[in-house]
Image: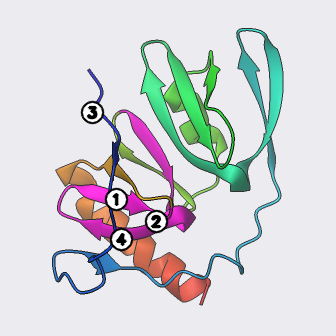
């Protein structure tokens, strides 16, 4: 069973030492790649810069896009992992691929996105995610 995505209130995150604020400029990144995905009703083309995260669900995946309903596709999460650019997209958990440019905070076991959703990340990926986030901070500042 996949962990639940939890809406998170970010009022006091800035002053809380448990949370690490990231300073990635959201305006500087420009990924204009289109991804063609198969859904149950047909094929959809998605701009990858609008993807927030992808969640595995049985033998399919759910793509969460900003300001749109989630899209359920027939592809496995491994399919996306091989097609999305690194390090902007990272498989942080066996059930999640996250758009690293949308991460605002990270804390013990969770990544908090710019829309205040918490995404779990596995302990074995902690060092990788921290190094990717540090790289992206330098790249997009």
Query: Is 58 left, or right, of 74 in this rendering?
Result: left
Q: Would you say residue 140 sits in the magenta stretch?
A: no
Secondary element under disc 2, as helix, strand or loop, is strand
Find numbered disc 1 in the image and state the secondary structure of the residue it sits on.
strand
Label pair 4/1, CB-CB below 8 angstroms: yes
Determine which residue is flagged by label 4.
105
**Between discs 2 and 3, the one toward the N terminus:** 3
Is 121 drawn above or below residue 20 in the view shown? above
CA gap, disc 2 to disc 4?
6 Å
Mark pair 1, 3: CA separation? 13 Å
* Residue 14, x across and y down, in percent: 30, 84
Whichever of labels 1 and 3 marks the residue nearer the N terminus, that label is: 3
Q: Dots 4 and 3: beta carbons under 8 Å?
A: no
Label 3: element kind = loop
Disc 1 residue crowd, few under 14, some 14–19, many 20+, Cα 10 Å: many
- Label pair 2/3, CB-CB below 8 angstroms: no
Q: Which residue is mark 1?
A: 111
**Residues in magenta?**
95-114
Dot 4 or dot 1: first in sequence order is 4
Q: Earlier in the sequence, mark 2 or mark 1?
A: 2
Residue 36: name its quadrant.
top right
Total marks in image: 4
Using the image, determine if residue 85 lies above or below residue 76: below
**Residue found at the far top of this picture:** 40
> Which quarter of the figure has residue 69?
top right
Q: Nearer the viewer, residue 128 or 122?
A: 122
Mark-to-mark CA distance, 4 and 3: 19 Å
The residue at 82%/20% (across/down) is 43
Kindly indicate whether the residue at mark 1 contacts the one at mark 2 (C-beta within 8 angstroms).
Answer: yes
Mark linked to residue 3? 3
**Residue bearing mark 2:** 103
Q: Secondary structure at mark 4?
A: strand
């Amino acid at each position: 069973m996949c962990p639940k995505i939890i809406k998170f209130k970010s009022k006091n995150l800035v002053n809380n030492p448990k949370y690490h604020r990231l300073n990635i400029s959201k305006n500087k990144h420009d990924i204009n790649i289109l991804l063609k995905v198969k859904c149950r009703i047909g094929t959809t083309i998605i701009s990858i810069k609008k993807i927030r995260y992808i969640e595995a669900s049985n033998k399919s995946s759910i793509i969460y896009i900003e300001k749109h309903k989630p899209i359920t596709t027939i592809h496995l999460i491994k399919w996306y992992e091989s097609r999305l650019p690194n390090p902007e997209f990272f498989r942080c958990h066996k059930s999640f691929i996250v758009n690293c440019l949308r991460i605002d905070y990270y804390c013990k076991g969770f990544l908090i996105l710019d829309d205040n959703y918490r995404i779990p990340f596995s302990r074995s990926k902690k060092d990788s995610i921290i190094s990717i986030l540090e790289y992206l901070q330098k790249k997009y500042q």
